[in-house]
Amino acid sequence: MNKKIFFDKDFEVFFGSKDPMELAKNLDGKLYRDYANRKTKQFFFKGTSYFLKYHGPVGWKELLKNLIQIKIPVVGAEREWKALLKLQSIKVNCPEPIAFMSKGWNPANKESFLVTKDLEGTISLEDFFKNKMDRDISVSQKRDLLKNVALICRAIHMNGLNHRDLYLCHFHIEKDTNSTYKDIALIDLHRAQIRKKVPLRWSTKDIGGLLHSIIQFGISEADCYRFLEVYFDSSLRELLIKNKNFIRRARSRAYSMYMKPICEEIDITDNKMLSDSSGYVKEIGKDYRWIGSKALVSSSVLELLQDLDGAIKNGKVIKQEQGHHIVSLDMDGKRIFIKRYQVKSAWHLVRKIFSQSRALNSWIAIHWLRAVNISTVEPILIYEKLNSFTSLDAYLITSEIKGEILSDVCKENMKDALIVARIHSLFKRLKWIGFNHGDAKTSNFFLDKDNLIVFDLDTSRRRTSSFMIEKKINKDKDRLIKSVEDNLGLHTALSKRLFD
């Protein structure tokens, strides 16, 4: 079954050979993408730039794999063609659709292509931020840009279309930095779905994906809420009351996507070695393994690893208990901390077979917290001793923490308002990523000027259940409030702010 649509008579003549599909497959042009069965080429016709997207047969293997995974396979260009027509009908700027053809009825062997006009003079939002072009526009322009992106997202979701690849790279804006950014275009809709109403599952995936793609460029919390106010056409108060679930789901997806490659890269339990371009360095031996930051693992640190227990004996003791031992050392003109997590008993060793080390808990939590701008210790390296079944003693090496321990600051009754504000912000951000501290008390925080620094994350962990994270964070709050009982004013203020 063949289907042809040409909105331009010249293109009907251009593709009017006996087999337009063969012409599309072999068309000369600049190849932009060659992925599996899809090719995207730029070509010129009568002095104008166009893009052709060819979709070849997906094959039964790929089709069945998608169906087994309960995914809707992309089997042609028709989905994008219909999505472009939909965008035009709802006045959302997009590449102008020019021609479409589909050949065959068997979904595994179907071929198709579409032609669109080039969005000349534009740049993707991802490249806009990567090239730091946002520094050349005013605050007013930035807010217009954010508002107009939000209006596009609102328009497509309100009209039953979800993108499924809604990232910064798929929004195109004018290169001119004097622009008001009213003509933002949405591209790459080959996975888009159209229905009467977009389900919550898919709208949160779209917005979560968009947020994920901008995290690396330092979007502020205020900008996120400005975006959502426009997207929901509501005030901030209404937004936080009526759309809590949406915000939680979208944010959780965003940070999960953002942290996935980072967590894979810092995974000490994965025997796969790192690429040369990685920001980390790893070594795996017969009875040990370690991974650390390439920028911070100096020759002096590598020398330490030859005898970590000896280094601990020579260090200044900060804390020594049955389960762990903390010392500080001066090295390369800086001070570092080494924390050894010891196997406490035979039962503890058995339990460790089924759980990761507390050093690894802390190592992972540190990276997650830093993703949402929670200040914590700077991680240098994690080292684990191994036997045939599990890790034994584990070591976490970090940089020195600046500032004063919070328990001492609380006694001064001088910075109560600041402490309350910082702790409230901490728990809000922990909730964003689904983490609880596990041992929240003032002795596990530092205050450096106005900056709250979190450490001692041995029992911190991420939880997928919203009920469980609420329960665990409330437990953290109770423990922290209890730790300031000697300061009545701070105790009262924290109790009110954290459980308001």
Image (tube, rainbow, N blue to C red):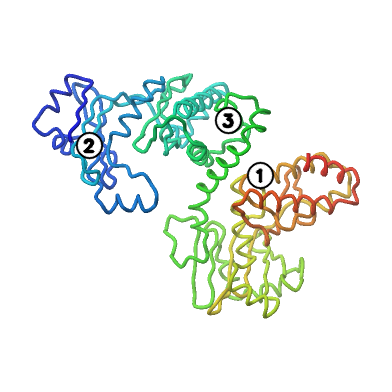
Residue 218 horizontal side relative to residue 89, left or right: right
Residue nearer the viewer, 4 or 13: 4
The relative height of residue 212 versus residue 330 in the rendered view (above or below) is above
Residue 450 horizontal side relative to residue 305, left or right: right
As drawn, the label of residue 70 is none
- Tag 2, which secondary structure? strand
The kind of residue tagged 3 is Leu
- Tag 3, which secondary structure? helix
The residue singled out by tag 1 in the image is: 429
The kind of residue tagged 1 is Arg
Across and down, in percent, residue 133 comes to: 48, 30
As drawn, the label of residue 112 is 2
- The residue sitting at 83% across, 53% down in the picture is 407
Q: CA distance from mark 2 to mark 3?
A: 37 Å
Across and down, in percent, residue 428 comes to: 68, 43
Q: CA distance from mark 1 to mark 3?
A: 17 Å
**Which sits earlier in the primary sequence, circle 1 or circle 3?**
3
Across and down, in percent, residue 435 comes to: 64, 52
- The residue sitting at 72% across, 67% down in the picture is 326
The kind of residue tagged 2 is Ser
Image quadrant assignment for residue 438: bottom right
- The residue sitting at 59% across, 58% down in the picture is 364
**Which sits earlier in the primary sequence, circle 2 or circle 3?**
2
The residue singled out by tag 3 in the image is: 228
Q: Quadrant of the C terminus?
A: top right
**Which sits earlier in the primary sequence, circle 1 or circle 2?**
2
Q: Quadrant of the N terminus?
A: top left
